[in-house]
Image: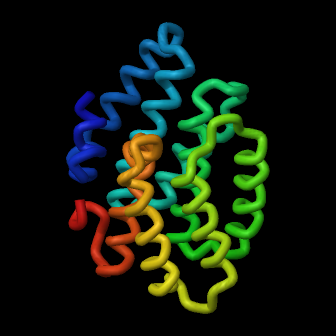
Amino acid sequence: ALVYKHYLLGTFEEGLKLVPELEEKMNFYERNLDTHRILVFYYRIAWLHFGQGNYSESIDYLNKIINLKVGHLREDIQSYSRLLHLLAHFELRNFSLLEYLEKSVSRFFDKMKDRNKVQLEMLSFIRKQLRSSNVPDEKLLKATQKNLIKLANDPYEKRAFLYLNALDWIESKLQNKTLAQII
C-alpha cells in the first residue's frame, strides 16, 4: 500500500527506499504469494524506477513481468508493462531496439481481448516518434497529449491512467522536467 501511495503521489525516491525490504519479504513469503501479487509488485516497483529516471532498473523489473509465463492472467498489467518498457527504452534512446519492441507490443495487443484507447494512443505515439527526426517531437507530444486529455474524460478510459500516467509523462517531456516534478 505504501509503494502504491508513492507511485500515485510521484514521491518515487521515497518509494524506492521501501523496495529492498519489500523484496526481502517477497522472497521470504515466495511460496505464499500468488503470481497476481508478484506482477503488481514488480509493476509498481518498475514505475517507481521509471518516475525516478532509473530507466534501466525499470526495464529490469518490466522484463520480469514480460518473461513470466502467466497466459492471460492480468493482461492489463502485462500490456502496461510492455508500454512502460517501450517508454523506458525511448528515454534511453534505444531506437534500434525500439522498432523491434514496437512490433512485438503490437502483436501482443492484437492478441489481447481487453485493450483500450490509451494503450493504442501511446503505441501510436511510439510508432510516429520512430518515424520522426526530432526526439522527442514536440508537435507529436502535443497532439498525443490532446488525444489523451479527451480520453481522460471518458469514463471507460479513466482506469488506464491509474496504470500508465501518460499525461504527466508527456507534460514532463514538454516542460523538460522530471516526472516527479510534474506530479
Residue at the location (44% across, 62% down)? Answer: 148
Q: Whole-percent x and y of residue 116?
A: 57, 46
Q: Is residue 158 above or below residue 121?
A: above
Q: Is residue 49 visible?
A: no
The C terminus lies in which quarter of the figure? Answer: bottom left
Q: Quadrant of residue 172?
A: bottom left
Q: Residue at 77% x, 60% y: name it.
A: 103
Return the x and y of residue 14 as percentages of the image width and height: 21, 47
Q: Would residue 72 be found to the left or right of residue 181 on screen?
A: right
Left or right side of 93 for 3: left
Residue at x 23%, y 32% (from the top left corner): 2
Q: Residue at x 52, y 54 (%)?
A: 118
- Which residue sits furthest bottom? 133
Indicate the quadrant containing the N terminus: top left, top right, bottom left or bottom right: top left
Please, is residue 77 above or below residue 142 in the view?
A: above
**Lateral position of residue 136 relative to residue 150, left or right:** right
